[in-house]
Amino acid sequence: MRLSVKHNISQVLIFGIVMLAACAAVCSCSAQKEEAPIIPPVTSPFSRDYIGYGVITASYTHVTEEPEEGSVSMGYLRRGSLVRLKQRRTVKTGNSSVSWVLIEEPASGWLKEEVMDVYDNESRAKTAAESIAR
């Protein structure tokens, strides 16, 4: 009789361990929540490698090597050209200040900001460039 009691106790213990493991597995599966997709925050303009887009409004303008009058011309852009702005710099000469922007596309160099309209995103700038071209 002793042997059968020990045998029954070990079976009960094994059964109990199996049931606990099964409960743990079921509980952990049902407790998991569906993961929502991670939506990144809106990109700050300070974390981008550019500050905006410009559309040339002058008939044509020279792209210069440095942000100053009389600098070497690197080429020119025509009215309606879309440019990507990397940097803005204000240069003071005498009593006046001139704002210059560094562009990288379609040419690399400096332009006076007064020869363009500046936009915060590419789609608005493209729309403006298309309306100028019409």
Image (cartoon, grey):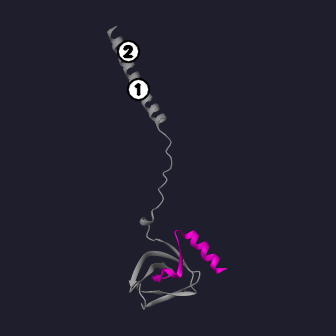
Which residue is found at the position 47% from the left and 83% from the top?
A: 111
Q: Give the image location of residue 65, x and y in percent.
A: 42, 86
Which residue is found at the position 55% from the left and 70% from the top?
A: 122
Q: Give the image location of residue 117, x and y in percent.
A: 54, 76
Residue 110 falls inside the magenta stretch: yes
Which of pointers 2 and 1 lies earlier in the amino acid sequence? 2
Instruction: Look at mark 2 in the image and give the residue it sits on.
Output: 8
Q: Give the image location of residue 106, x and y in percent.
A: 51, 80
Residue at the outermost front position: 95
Front one among 104 and 17: 104
Which residue is found at the position 38% from the left and 25% from the top?
A: 17
Report the disc number at residue 20. Answer: 1
Stretch in magenta: 107-134
Direction from residue 89 to residue 58 in the image, left or right = right
Front one among 96 and 119: 96
Q: Amino acid at mark 2?
A: Asn
Q: Amino acid at mark 1?
A: Leu
Report crowding for label 2: few under 14, some 14 to 19, many 20 or more residues within 10 A (C-alpha): few
Tell us which disc is closer to us: 2 or 1: 1
Mark 1: which secondary structure?
A: helix
Front one among 23 and 74: 74
Specify the quadrant that holds the C terminus: bottom right
Which residue is found at the position 59% from the left and 80% from the top?
A: 80
Specify the quadrant that holds the N terminus: top left
Q: CA distance from mark 2 to mark 1?
A: 18 Å
Residue at the outermost right position: 134
Q: Give the image location of residue 23, x and y in percent.
A: 44, 28
Mark 2: which secondary structure?
A: helix
